[in-house]
Image (tube, grey):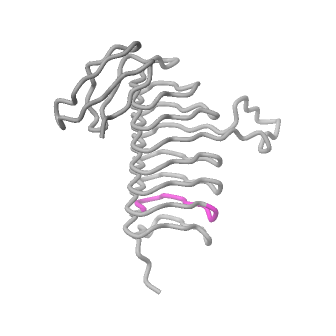
Amino acid sequence: MEKLYKVHSTAIVDDGAQIGAGTTVWHWVHICGGAKIGEKCSFGQNVFVGNNVTIGNNVKVQNNVSIYDNVFIEDDVFCGPSMVFTNVYNPRSAVSRKNEYRDTFVKRGATLGANCTIVCGSTIGEFAFIGAGAVINKDVKPYALMVGVPARQIGWMSEFGERLDLPLSGDAQTICKNTGKKYILNNGVVSKVE
């Protein structure tokens, strides 16, 4: 039976891994047998995907990213080069904490910039944008723009990936200059008007 996805000859895909049609697995990638991966994803060079991992459709994982157990990624997420997920909050080499893994959720459309770190137990909201090098150690609101160590919110991003002209709190509305879509800030939460 012909595979409906592409795997480079240097990659390892363990038996049992579920990979959707149109997905591409590049050089020196290792996908464990329990992983569930959607359609039209791309895994760059030297990516690792653990067993208890679910990845949606059209997810782009750039070079040198490890997606450890208990990380759950929805559709249309971008994982920038060398960004980091964790799954143990307080690791020690001499102490086994595999029964203490904390779930991490990355919601639809989020961008995780190059070299950012997502500390386990966090939820990244829909279309949030995590800047390069940021360290996330708490939940992130949908559409939030986060930068720094530890990360702090400095603005809001559109679904197109452009900064929105909205204050951090209060009530306001704006239009994405690239798409013409309207966004509303209400009580510190942004939503797009359909």
Q: In which quadrant of the rendered view does residue 22 lie?
A: bottom left
In the rendered view, tell whether residue 56 sits above or below residue 87: below
In the rendered view, tell whether residue 143 sits above or below residue 149: below
Which residue, as the protein is rendered here, is positioned at the far right?
A: 95
**In the drawing, does residue 53 fall left or right of residue 89?**
left
In the rendered view, tell whether residue 63 sits above or below residue 116: below
**In the drawing, does residue 86 fall left or right of residue 79?**
right
- Position of the C terminus, as image quadrant, is top left
Q: Is residue 30 magenta?
A: yes
Q: In which quadrant of the rendered view does residue 173 lie?
A: top left
Which residue, as the protein is rendered here, is positioned at the far bottom?
A: 1
Which one is nearer the viewer's eye here, 4 or 76?
Answer: 76
Q: Residue at x 45, y 67 (%)?
A: 20
Q: Residue at x 43, y 70 (%)?
A: 9
Residue 149, percent across and down?
50, 17
**In the drawing, does residue 73 fall left or right of residue 102?**
left
Which one is nearer the viewer's eye here, 44 or 51?
Answer: 51
Q: Which residues are magenta?
A: 25-34
Residue 91, percent across and down?
73, 32
Which one is nearer the viewer's eye here, 159 or 97?
Answer: 159
Residue 8, percent across and down?
41, 67
Q: In which quadrant of the rendered view does residue 102 lie?
A: top right
Q: Is residue 157 magenta?
A: no
How many labels, in total?
A: 0
Residue 41, percent across and down?
40, 58
SS majority, magenta = loop
**In the drawing, does residue 146 fall left or right of residue 99?**
left
Q: Residue at x 56, y 28 (%)?
A: 139
